[in-house]
Image (cartoon, grey):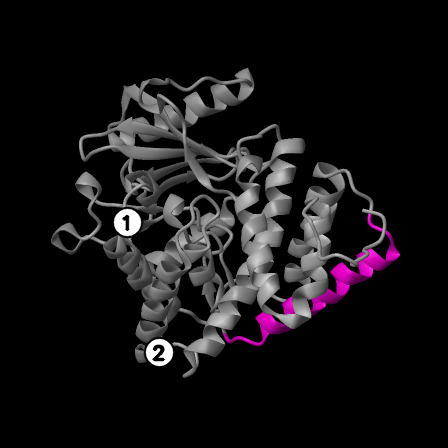
Amino acid sequence: MSPTSSLPNAAHSPPAWADPQRESLFETWFAQVQAVHQLDRASLRIASADASFRRYLRVGSPTGSLIIMDAPPAKEDCKPFVHVAQLMEHAQLKAPKVLDWEETHGFMLLTDLGAQTMMQVIDTQAPPPLNLYLEAVDTLVQWQLSSKPGILPPYDHALLQRELELFPQWYIGEHRQITLDAAQRKTLDDAFACIIEHNLAWPSVYVHRDFMPRNLMVGAGGVANVHGEKLGVLDFQDAVYGPITYDIASLMRDAFLSWDEDFCLDVTIRYWDKARKAGLPVGDDFGEFYRGVEWMGLQRHLKVAGIFARLTLRDGKPQYLADTPRFIGYMLATCARYRELKPLLRLIEAVEGLQVPSGFSFGRI
């Protein structure tokens, strides 16, 4: 997961380079694309960075601002980004178009979708913006309708398992400094097997994997549907072919903001109804679909808790770990609803130091 995050005072920050050699490579490439696209060198500014090793610059041109991706090839593989960008263009989605790609050194010139994410225009103190979420639902349905098997990597058992293992490795082990005993590890293994089985039972479509307000761009003035303008989609390079429940779970069980369950339920129902009428394989029983969304969301939150702990402890980005209480809340709420997940519930409660029912004993945590 690599959530895009705006940098403070980004519009006033010229790019700095920690590596003089990479700066020289950039200047050589920039001179070439500058001539072709008439780029304004003086306007070059930092636009944003994300949880990976990529960063983004904004530069002016006669046709408007453009985005430069700086992605060191030793750290980042841009091929998936280019591939998925083409898929999104074919799906008639609003996504960055690749204007130039210097594959050897990892520089890319892209169209600019603007400076405002859906997250940035949301007032969390006001009622949730239903119109924006319905725009997101329409975008998601359009993306899923373009799905074809064999195009994107499969979101299969092995990948789901690897993602889940981030939780015990980085969150429990490295962040909480807890060593699980054999019984506790078996509790996790049994829960993971159950979660994977439930999630893989759903049909596959294209999955963005971070479909949430931080990665959706709004139109001019923060309004998504002015003159029929679509939401823009970013940060799609990790897209896979997997359970149809994933992206709606990502949207409504956000890594960075929370809404009341009634609102989440309302938007999920609206998505399910639109998807079903469009012929997408969401089933005819909303209750069954919503259970699928909850189980998929649980897998995602276990994974993200591990990733955010890793970002803090390995990559020096502590701001992400501050959001883990939200994930823990999602996990506890979902585990409490399903009998099969009660052992996992008790384990997470113990890891978090929460009070468990009297008489309950769970190892040496």
Residue 279, picture quadrant? bottom left
Find numbered disc 1 in the image and state the secondary structure of the residue it sits on: loop
Residue 311 position in % (x across, y down): 61, 36
Tell which of 280 and 73 is nearer to you.
280
Category of crowding for the residue at label 2, using alpha-carbon neighbours closer than 10 angstroms: few (below 14), some (14–19), many (at least 20): some
Q: Is residue 101 left or right of residue 19?
A: left
Query: In this picture, is 181 found above or below 293?
Result: above
Q: Tag 2: residue type?
A: Arg
Is 40 within the magenta? no
Q: Is residue 285 left or right of residue 334?
A: left
Residue 280, picture quadrant? bottom left
Q: Tag 1: residue type?
A: Pro
Query: In this picture, is 42 found above or below 328?
Result: above
Q: Is residue 171 left or right of residue 263?
A: right
Q: Which residue is mark 2?
A: 276
Range of magenta residues: 180-203
Residue shown at the point (34%, 34%) measured from the top left: 67
Find numbered disc 2 in the image and state the secondary structure of the residue it sits on: helix
Q: Which residue is mark 1?
A: 127
